[in-house]
DNA sequence: CTGTTAGCGCTTTCAG
DNA sequence: CTGAAAGCGCTAACAG
């Protein structure tokens, strides 16, 4: 195995000191263009790429961003084979952004409910020394983690988190998206629009509910709290919530569910009651995971890739010493109209 | 930001030399149990976790495994939102295995068709210095990559690759799985069983076809080559292949498709021709991505997680100096009977 | 069985 | 503008 080419080889090849090479590859000032050129040529010729480990040892940066996901939830998603693509979208946004800046994203799983969260996160940080940490729900709102990161002075981003606090909050406007979906249904002519909430452990759940309340409140017929059914993002809770809505004296003709799985549950439950979409019932879901596509459900698109990309970018810039970075970033949500929505039957 | 705890702190705390601490954390011999105990106590007390970067610098191992996936194909999968969960399954198997051994898996994307493959892979290796590389199709069979890795003397595993050659080949028995699926259909009473091939760029395609040929050849009615339609794993090719099969003078009553997407295409194409599954046509697919679940297709399960886990384990053990590791590993395939298969109509 | 010494490949700091 | 020296946290090789 031929020994790897190091900065020394490049220095020798270009006839300069290590330091000069270091300056050139880090785009630092104080190197004459001629010398710069010579160094770059040597780098290209030798195919030199600096070692992350050595950079980390010598300097203060590791060129590593750590993405922290909830262990149980993630593994459960992988095992179920339900095609939840949160991780993929996050990789797409985060990894590619990192790549563009010479960074790597390293994916870690930590149990948010464990009493060892602190030790687990500390351990990962000690092993990796990341320059920044990307937190996904429910970690984004876990004070055991955000607190630790704050204390360590390690930059971090909270994805899909709207709460105030340390770190960069990167989210979409869930309330606005919810209102948008409701307005879409109202626009189609629906009057009684039901809502299925998500688990309160997730910050987005509250925002989605708020948006619903707001949009319904502003509608001609006003808000009817009985049209709100509790869910927790699980399929079962979606079934129960839909059953409750269907049992209402005057059942809704449209339903907005806080995630795809519950929306799917709602559709199937309705079907079991002889109601089919979109003829008898319109349904809109949140998130737009592959399930929404397969089930042909109209959905609000959660821009996970974009949020991850923004998070990565903020962390990288923050590490590079940039100040004046926005503490709260809002990414536009999307909307995918599909076959589960239509005007109500006359 | 409190300075991180290093091996020095532990040594001081335990009243021993750095080296002794190093020996203990690496489970090396020649440390008295009493001392070992003292060191472990210090480690626990201080919450010490060794820095990967420093270990890499000092020693010969980096505790990093690099998983190489095809860039275009992966990003395309992520963007499409079709729920292909190859990456997820690979992370599940590989990451968790790495974790169990104090390793990390780092995910990299490289264009298999680019003329810069060599430079790209070299660059990633120079930056990361992984102890081993996991290759997924079509990289597994790309001589530009396997050759480079061989030359560098870097251990690597080829997932879903059956070809002879350097590195650890880890696969399932695609031919056997194919034969198993065919036998399943024959067992249900089908006589004319069609087959849709996969892209020849992937080694599994050939094996799957072989298994089909073999099982059909051994059947009462023998092999009929006209029942084999060409595909390339894409939806469109599945449609075309199914059209071809349906245009046959005596059309098949069952079809085995080399992946889920083509099976899905086959089902939809059949439906457009007024044939519904499983009444008029049985379909079995390969891979068992979430699509198979959503479309309720009987499928051969490709054990990606297990293959990745085996690959990771082999590489880690190889790095640890173990010899006598199997150069070819076979992981059991699975089978998920679902609603797309039944006995043919009388 | 244990400790000492020398790096690994970089960046930081400080001289020139 | 450039270079030389020191050191990051660890392990390998060697002494004891």
Image (tube, coloured by chain):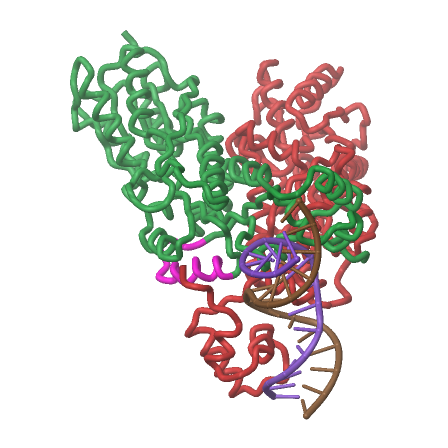
Chain colours: A green, B red, C purple, D brown
Residue A41 at x, y percent in the picture: 77, 40
Left or right of A261, for residue C16: right
Q: On the rendered structure, is A194 left or right of B155?
A: left
Residue A303 forms part of the magenta stretch: no
Residue A17 vs residue B149, the one in the foreground: A17
The image quarter containing residue A333 is top left
Task: Find the magenta span and give its range.
Answer: A110-126
Q: Is-magenta flag for residue A120?
A: yes
Q: Nearer the viewer, residue A23 or B321?
A: A23
Q: Quadrant of residue B309?
A: bottom right
Give the image location of residue B179, x and y in percent.
73, 40
Residue at image x 53%, y 72%?
Answer: B7
In this view of the protein, which residue sits in the foreground, A297 or A201?
A: A201
- From this view, report whether residue A256 is shown above or below residue A6: above
Q: Looking at the rendering, in which quadrant would you find the C terminus of chain A?
A: top left
Residue drawn 57% across the image and 35% down it: B84
């Amino acid at each position: 195995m031929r020994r790897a080419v190091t900065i020394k080889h490049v220095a020798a090849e270009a006839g300069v000191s290590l330091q000069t090479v270091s300056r050139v590859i880090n785009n630092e000032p104080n190197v004459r263009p001629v010398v710069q050129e010579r160094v770059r040529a040597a780098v290209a010729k030798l195919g030199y790429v600096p070692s992350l480990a050595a950079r980390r040892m010598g300097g203060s940066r590791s060129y590593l961003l750590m993405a922290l996901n909830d262990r149980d939830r993630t593994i459960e998603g992988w095992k179920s084979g339900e095609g939840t693509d949160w991780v993929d979208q996050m990789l797409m946004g985060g990894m590619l952004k990192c790549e563009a800046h010479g960074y790597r994203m390293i994916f870690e799983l930590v149990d948010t409910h464990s009493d060892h969260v602190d030790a687990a996160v500390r351990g990962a940080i000690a092993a990796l020394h990341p320059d920044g940490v990307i937190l996904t729900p429910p970690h984004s709102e876990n004070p055991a983690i955000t607190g630790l990161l704050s204390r360590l002075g390690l930059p971090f981003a909270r994805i899909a988190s709207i709460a105030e606090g340390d770190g960069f909050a990167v989210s979409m406007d869930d309330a606005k998206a919810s209102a948008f979906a409701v307005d879409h249904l109202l626009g189609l002519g629906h009057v009684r629009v039901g809502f299925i909430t998500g688990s309160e452990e997730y910050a987005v759940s509250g925002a989605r509910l708020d948006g619903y309340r707001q949009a319904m409140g502003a509608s001609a017929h006003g808000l009817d709290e009985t049209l709100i059914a509790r869910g927790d993002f699980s399929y079962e809770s979606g079934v129960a919530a839909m059953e409750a809505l269907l049992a209402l004296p005057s059942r809704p003709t449209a339903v907005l569910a806080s995630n795809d799985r519950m929306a799917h549950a709602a559709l199937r439950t309705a079907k079991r009651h002889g109601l089919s979409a979109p003829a008898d019932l319109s349904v809109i879901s949140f998130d737009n995971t592959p399930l929404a596509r397969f089930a042909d459900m109209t959905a609000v698109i959660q821009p996970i890739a974009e949020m991850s990309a923004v998070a990565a970018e903020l962390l990288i810039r923050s590490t590079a010493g940039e100040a004046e970075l926005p503490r709260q970033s809002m990414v536009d949500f999307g909307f995918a109209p599909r076959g589960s929505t239509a005007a109500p039957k006359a």
